[in-house]
Image (cartoon, helix red, strand yellow):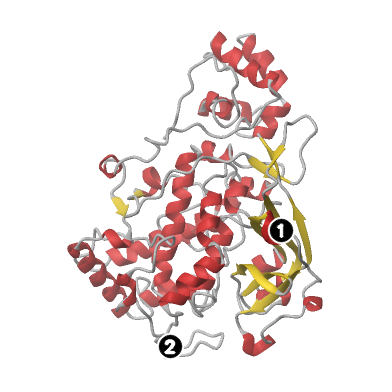
Amino acid sequence: MSVTPTYPVAHPTWYDTIRLMFTKTDIEHMGTQHLDLTSYEQVQVGAGNIYGQVASQKMPPGNPWTQDMNQTFLNWITDGCPKGVPAYAPASAMMSLTARKTAATRIRKDVNSLSATERDTLKKAFEGILANGVSDPNSYFAQAGIHWLPLPAYCMHHAPAYNPWHRAYLLGFENALRSIPGCANVTLPYWDITTPFPDLLKSPPYDSYTLPQDIGGGYDKGYVTQRFSYPDIQAGLLRYDVTGDINRALTKTDWEDFHGYWSGATNNTIIAAHDGGHGSIGPTMSDPSVAAFDPVFWFFHANWDRLWWEWQKKTQATDLNGLLTTIDKLTDPVSYQIFTIGPLEALTPFTAQPAGLTTVKVIDSVNSLSVDYAPPTTEAPMLAFALKTSRAASINRAVSLNPQRATVSVTGINRVKIPGSFAVNLLKDGKQIASRFMFQPPEPEQCETCVKNAMTHFDFDLPLAEVSGGKLSVEVEPVNKKVVGARFPAKLMGNPKIDVHIPLQTD
């Protein structure tokens, strides 16, 4: 929900005030002058020139800023162009379900909140697509097969299009469910992964799936999807700190930091949570080749889409211009380009389908897709935005630090050398103190996305006391121990390194 500033603002920041001062018309007009008003970096560099134009009433054309707006912009320059955090009112940041229904026709609910009628309809829809022949595009087999096997595979993991691609994927699966007679209004529920594994998903038709034919990769007809025991799933989610990663992600203001992993961002937010979730659930969900065949995949991924949408609302990034203001164009040009360069906006194979979904078309979940999410059954408190942390800061920016916390980074791992998904265990004096998970295919060297992002890193946010006073080491534990054993040799994957630092905090 947008929070409109009241001018003048004495100490404005980019996120709470400045980016909201530029209208869509302003952005489009200045785009023709090679000035991107959605880019913090460009506005910061050009702030003096922009102020000169608006203060002289030359800009925006035909709709000049008021003197109070001009003063606000000057105050921002005087304060050193702080980035800050978005302004939002916690009490009203989440619209009520009643209000949502006026904007979206598809309200996806917490799987634990479904009524008896909703459970019956959902089961009918699942059983309907399970009964469809494998050649039917609305069959469970065909929909699950889009994720990886049978080939062709579409790897959209550890890449900027991860969330847009999976949002389109979920919509296609939900449409398949709706194709079953009597299920035209069914919606795909989500599993809030911070809560126990849902009882509904422990029984047919959601507990397993049997492949009706060979799909390659050693997965033959008759293969039955596999999960760990439900207590072990909960233990895995705790081991990989999935809830902690989610909570960190929801306090981030920048696109890169929300996702983590790429463009120098720490790998301990949404991507890490997603990977840790896959690794916690079982052998099938740990392998991208077949993960989507386990029915829990759909409820699992509906939750990641929900979290992305909640973050979008908090950061006022529910439309293209709003989203672009959260992307650092200089340090993460690829993320910026997938929303601004036509050919790069494609989401294969969904763009070629009748809906023609692209990265841009899926940004506004409510107004473009008519999809929204009801709050979880047990709703967590709204998390405040955290100030940005980094290893270094410009000398003209104020910094602070918290000597009680430390970030341990494991770098230099060439994941393409490791066959399949794996865990990275951080050890202190030989005892495991933290773990991360990497979700990747059995043959990553044959995956274009994996090869492009071969060198990976893992970040652990820990109390300083937990890492001090002992010798730190790291081990890589492959999921497929039959192929490479219980531990993967460090010298074969690039001789990883450990770096410990106390993060600096800036505005």
Residue 398 relative to residue 462: left or right: right
Vertical placement of residue 141 versus 504, above or below: below
Residue found at x 46% / y 33%: 88
Residue 108 relative to residue 278: left or right: left
Residue found at x 58% / y 67%: 155
Residue 345 appears at what percent x and percent y? Answer: 56, 51
- Residue 428's image quarter? bottom right
Q: Pick whichever of labels 2 and 1 is earlier in the sequence.
A: 2
Q: Look at the image and tell me whether residue 319 can be seen.
A: no
Residue found at x 60% / y 12%: 71
Q: Which amino acid, mark 1?
A: Val
Residue 367 appears at what percent x and percent y? Answer: 37, 43
Crowd band around label 1 with a 10 angstrom C-alpha radius: few (<14), some (14–19), many (20+): many
* Element at label 1: strand
Quadrant where the N terminus is found in the figure: top left
Q: Nearer the viewer, residue 400 or 129?
A: 400
- Residue 477's image quarter? bottom right
Residue 205 relative to residue 239: left or right: left
Residue found at x 57% / y 44%: 252
Quadrant where the C terminus is found in the figure: top right
Q: Which amino acid, mark 2?
A: Gln
- Residue under label 1: 408
Pair 2/1: label in front: 1
Q: Nearer the viewer, residue 175 or 203?
A: 203
Vertical placement of residue 488 versus 187, above or below: below
* Element at label 2: loop
Residue 284 appears at what percent x and percent y? Answer: 49, 79
Name the mark on residue 386.
none
- Residue under label 2: 213
Crowd band around label 2 with a 10 angstrom C-alpha radius: few (<14), some (14–19), many (20+): some
- Distance in Å between CA atoms under marks 2 and 1: 45 Å
Residue 214 appears at what percent x and percent y? Answer: 47, 88
